[in-house]
Amino acid sequence: MPANMALLTLPPLSLYIHIPWCVQKCPYCDFNSHQAEQKNNTLNELDYVETLKNDLQLESQFTYGRKLSSIFFGGGTPSIFSAHSIAAILDHAKKIIGFEDDIEITLEANPGTFEQEKFAGFYAAGVNRLSIGVQSFNEKHLQTLGRIHNSDEAKRAISIAKKAGFSNINIDIMHGLPQQSVDDAMKDLQQAIDCSPQHISWYQLTIEANTAFYRQPPTLPNDDILADIQERGSLLLTDNGFAQYEISAFSKNNQRSLHNLNYWQFGDYLGVGAGAHGKITDISNGRIIRRQKTRLPDHYLKNAKAPKTKQHTVATHELNIEFMMNALRLIEGVPSDFFEKRTGLALAEIQDSLTELQQQQLLAEASTHIKTTPLGQRFLNVVLEKLSAEEKINVDGLQTGKQ
Ligand SMILES: C[S@@+](CC[C@H](N)C(=O)[O-])C[C@H]1O[C@@H](n2cnc3c(N)ncnc32)[C@H](O)[C@@H]1O
Ligand code: SF4
């Protein structure tokens, strides 16, 4: 007997594949990424690919007849793997789950020479969107960030990606870097725009626990400079045809990241690879479950036949805020009926809070969508605190939406 009768429709299904190794660990990064060939984290590509395939087999029980609408190879540095390995993983996913005709397949790549040589191979393997981690075009800032590429290599990587056939390219740029001026940040953005990508992800640097920057904090720009960077940068992007559709995401001609959109619209995703998360609507039991793989690469590889996985049911009182934390990141919000369809909760239960936030002009008065006003975007923490009346949420988690 379904516990929640409202969960009768299934959202689109995505797949996240985590590759946990990098050539070198950056001092600001708290992702599950490990310098290859370090103790407990040996890069073992062949075994990892085999384990991923088994993992995928395990997760395929949660598709409930759906095909994949997007795949994202994230890291770490997925471009550290050979095109042959990426092709093997994709072939397996296609065989056991199946792809929608218009599937989006993204791979995160670093701009090193060694990676660029593989771009044509990734494209031939079926990857149709490349996300290139440039971060900055300024040599001094690249060094502070501990990056192993320089500005010319970043530009060359983008041009090689285009020659390889990619017509959907994202560039990651960070701002609010140590000692960065407003002009420095604008120059970085302008150079990214001049490379003519379809998408720019523009993240403000956050100092995360368990990083070298946390242990030895660099001097960051003050709040006034950060606010100026934010304001002038958004204008520069918009003036150049990049529409902002999420806190950090800007796209040209509506070429949004379908994979991230599915996260933000509270869709379903399977997660395979060390530390990967999945979120699934378990329609037969009327609940939403979250699954997570064991984090360390060597632990993940140890149980190669069935990698260690934790699972829990998302509590009803958490569903509301989990939905909102994702949906309200989107500038245009989400259709109101998604709330009931994707959480199984009745919108009426939070109507009083919604009305109050509308009266405070933090939420828009649109009857078709739940969305913030520009003021609500600025004070998203306040909006979420109101909506999570029974629950304290970690508002710091809002800064990055990446997995
Ligand atoms: C999974 S990470 C890295 C992908 C790829 N290995 C790279 O370094 O380019 C995805 C993106 O998150 C952003 N990022 C990582 N750490 C961050 C931090 N502390 N603050 C803001 N953005 C961060 C970077 O822009 C990065 O490209
Ligand atoms: S930012 Fe990218 S390259 Fe640097 S450690 Fe993190 S995942 Fe690896």
Image (cartoon, rainbow, N blue to C red):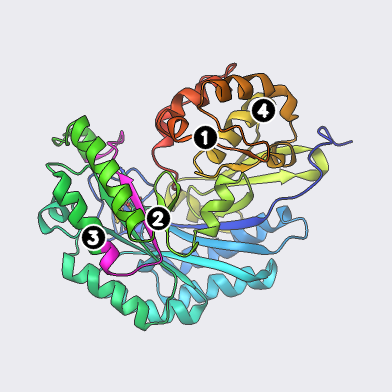
Residue depth check, mark 4 versus mark 3: number of the one nearer the observer: 3
Closer to the camera: disc 4 or disc 1? 1
Mark 2 neighbour density, 10 Å: few (under 14) some (14–19) many (20 or more): many
Q: Residue 378: say if magenta.
A: no
Q: Using the image as rendered, state which of residue 43 and residue 376 is in the foreground.
A: 376
Q: Which residue is mark 3?
A: 190
Secondary structure beneath dot 3 equals: helix
Residue 94: image x %, image y %?
64, 72
Asked if residue 175 lies left or right of residue 298, the reply is left
The residue under label 1 is 372
Q: Earlier in the sequence, mark 1 or mark 2?
A: 2
- Beta carbon of the mark 1 residue lies under 8 A of ligand 1: no
Range shown magenta: 192-212
Horizontal side of residue 226 vs 75, given as left or right: left
Label 1 and label 3: CA atoms lie apart by 28 Å
Q: Is residue 305 left or right of residue 247?
A: right
